[in-house]
Image: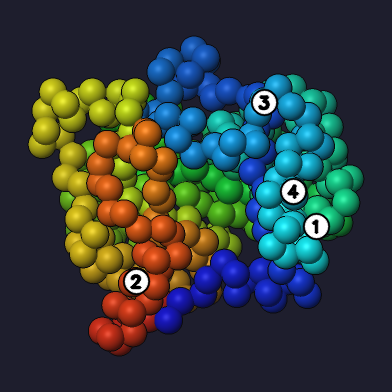
Amino acid sequence: MYKSFPQYLKEIFPCKVQKISLNVGLNCPNRDGTIGRGGCTYCNNRSFNPAYCDEYKSVTSQLDEGVAFFAHKYPEMEYLAYFQSYTNTYGEESRLRACYEEALAYPKVRGLIIATRPDCISASLMDYFAELAQRTFLLIELGVESLSDETLRLINRGHDVACARQCVHALAARGIPVGVHLILGLPGESRQQMLASAAELSRWPITTLKLHQLQLIKDTTLARQVAEHPDFVQLFSLDEYIAFLAQYIARLRPDIVLDRFVSQSPKEYLIAPDWGLKNFEFTHRLDNYLRSHGICQGGLYR
């Protein structure tokens, strides 16, 4: 029905691999005043950090704790070091490289996933990533969030669509696999605009795509905006989101690897929507919907 991330990893690795999230104490340019302050309006970074992610611990210590968390279930598991928190190419290049190399030196780490912004990768880092991709698994995951410049302004993202497109092409031209992250349901976007973004994104040379529904998280600008103006965003219900995702998937290029469809923040942070499903339970429902409606990835791709 669609090309999944586990399927993609099976094509590359002969064993089961698991991401381990890392926090190396970086920041974002729309938080520290470089291009803005306050960060993205929807973001509370604490809401998606595993407990073992602590910026005051070394990369090795965080990997130790991550491996301990997973190894009792799968002793033969190998790992991908996932630089997840904040903008993981934003800092002194020598320190960044040291963090990446420390992760790669860790036993059983077979590659890196580096989450960042499209406006925060220098040409020299891109050249380094091109060399890195020759010797290990590497995926650069770009937070693009929307293909609408109006929406990007509304959420205080600090870059535009052209910047994201240019970065994707520059990385892909160097032979570096690129992933894109989008949020569905952001303010200022109609459902039709979001569906149109699937066709546009399919023209970009991306390898993976990570999607999730907009969530209202405590202690964020967006939560305050919605409290003052309840119609500022239209949150998806569970059934609406599954039906919408099916149409979105049908419009995507068939070879794009679909990494994720949903996110569920911890209850202590989540305001809405609270669907009460674990990620695998949601995926099971989506798969059943696609199967029962005869929908597959690329079915409406032109």
Percent position of residue 61, x then y: 79, 35
The quarter in which the N terminus is drawn is: bottom left
Mark 2 residue element: helix
Q: Residues within 10 Å of mark 2 (few under 14, many from 20)?
A: some
In the picture of the structure, the residue carrying the numbered disc 4 is: 68
Is 300 drawn above or below residue 271 in the view shown?
below
Answer with mark 3 or mark 1, whichever residue precedes in sequence: 3
In the picture of the structure, the residue carrying the numbered disc 1 is: 110
Q: Which of the two discs, 4 and 1, sits closer to the camera?
A: 4
Report, in whole angstroms, how far the alpha carbon at label 3 lies from the one at label 1.
Answer: 22 Å
Report, in whole angstroms, how far the alpha carbon at label 2 lies from the one at label 1.
Answer: 30 Å
In the picture of the structure, the residue carrying the numbered disc 2 is: 286
Q: Are marks 2 and 3 in contact (CB under 8 Å)?
A: no
Answer with mark 3 or mark 4, whichever residue precedes in sequence: 3
Is 216 drawn above or below residue 78 in the view shown?
above
Report, in whole angstroms, how far the alpha carbon at label 4 lies from the one at label 2.
Answer: 31 Å
Percent position of residue 25, x then y: 65, 24
Q: Which of the two discs, 3 and 1, sits closer to the camera?
A: 3
Mark 4 residue element: helix
In the picture of the structure, the residue carrying the numbered disc 3 is: 55
Residue at point 66% right, 69% down? 9
Residue at point 27% right, 36% down? 271
Percent position of residue 138, x then y: 72, 54
Q: Is residue 5 left or right of residue 30?
A: right
Residue at the farthest top position: 33
**Any part of residue 231 in sight:** yes
